[in-house]
Image: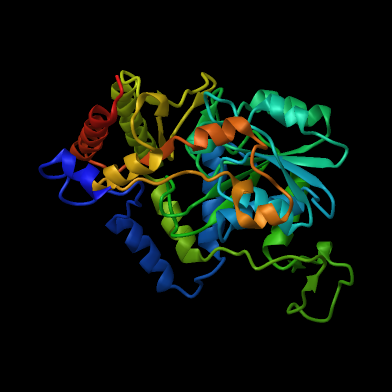
Amino acid sequence: MKEKLAIFGGKPVRTERIYYGRQWVEEEDINEVSQVLRSPLITCGPRVTRLEQRLCEYTGAKYAVAVSSGTAALHCACIAAGIGEGDEVITTPLTFAASANCALYCGGRPVFADVDPDTYNISPKSIENNITERTKAVVAVDYTGQAVMLDEIRQICREHKLCLIEDAAHSIGTAYKGRKVGSIADMTTFSFHPVKTVTGGEGGAVLTNDKALYEKLLLARGHGIVHDEELMEEAPHEGDWYYEQISLGFNYRMTDFQAALIDSQMNRLDEFVRRRRAIVARYNEVFSEMPELIIQKEIPESDTCRHLYILRLNLDRLSCSRREFYDAMSAENIQCQVHYVPVYWFPYYKHLGFQRGLCPEAEKIYSGIMSIPLYPKMSDNDVEDVIRAVKKLVRFYSLL
């Protein structure tokens, strides 16, 4: 590799490293967090309630439950959906492991449906082909921020009486047929990890329009404990200190200072969305002209805010492997990432009986993809440096 990199000669495209994703925290965000830290309540207080209201206002959903992470959101959603021992939950292999693990947490089993070869999102046809009498839910992931084919998947779920959980960890700010993601599926989960569009350092949320699901989500988040006498089994009691645990729940509460950071970031969400779209448009403009690269396609129904930009190598037209291209980008001080290793390739899933070859399209796509830098704080010069690096390597490795 050292010999091959030396052939490029000269200085790298950048002197300072640029990463695939990065948060954008300003002084007003810090001030909002500082106010909470100086207040009497710092965990699961009024700022969490305010954030939940804000998410409902933005998406059009009736209810929101803020939780400690995107993974916690998926777990709570599976609990609310009633996933239990032996139940099957269909999801995609091109995702972070939590999209499948959430079924295992509840005693269920993930079933992997293949993806569309052009959009890389879960295929409705493959979902339908994988439904059995044990299937209880679908976790449909908005991969890179593009909405899944919600109309088709909702129809499949209605016909088979399945719960549709939209894993929208990537897609806050995206709309489907004019409706914001968060207001469409039975339940929608968000993530506020630092590389997501808005961040709380960590954090997540579940949104729904169903009051019964909302009440189950609240119990799942907070130990299954209630303070409202109307929900208790043995009330009234002799003191207002009394509470009851009426189900098994978890400590998935969000802190008020996390909520304050996310709420403050929501003030710039539209700005973040516009900038991400502008960067994606510039990348697409350049890379669509290069036959050595394959551009992820987008369905017209999705007005997408991309969390990730996937550069897919057309390895038939290049003299390198994905690893060589990845390392060469790093040598140019452009730090990429790969999203994702198919979930069932991991040793833990192999021990559960899953084998390679299960989803051929997903595996084929995985072999050539990497995520290049995409985040709102990127300057135009940053974007052009990424483009220069890609062009430089394509010219060197091209077989044309």
Q: Can you see residue 231?
A: yes
In the displayed structure image, the side of residue 206 where residue 233 appears, left or right: right
What residue is shown at x 54% (from left), y 30% (from top)? 120
Question: Observer-nearest residue: 16 or 158?
Answer: 16
Location of residue 237 with respect to 29 vertically, above or below? below
Which of the 4 image quadrants contains residue 347? bottom right
**Residue 170: x and y, percent?**
50, 42
Question: Observer-nearest residue: 251 or 279?
Answer: 279
Viewport quadrant of the C terminus: top left
**Residue 399: x and y, percent?**
31, 23
The residue lying furthest to the front in this view is: 3
What residue is shown at x 32% (from left), y 24% (from top)? 287
Question: Observer-nearest residue: 100 or 346?
Answer: 346
Q: Can you see residue 65?
A: no
Location of residue 12 with respect to 302 vertically, above or below? below
Which of the 4 image quadrants contains residue 358? top right
**Residue 136: x and y, percent?**
81, 42
**Residue 23: x and y, percent?**
35, 52
What residue is shown at x 45% (from left), y 27% (from top)? 296
Which of the 4 image quadrants contains residue 289? top left
In the displayed structure image, the side of residue 325 where residue 364 appears, left or right: right
In the displayed structure image, the side of residue 275 where residue 123 appears, left or right: right
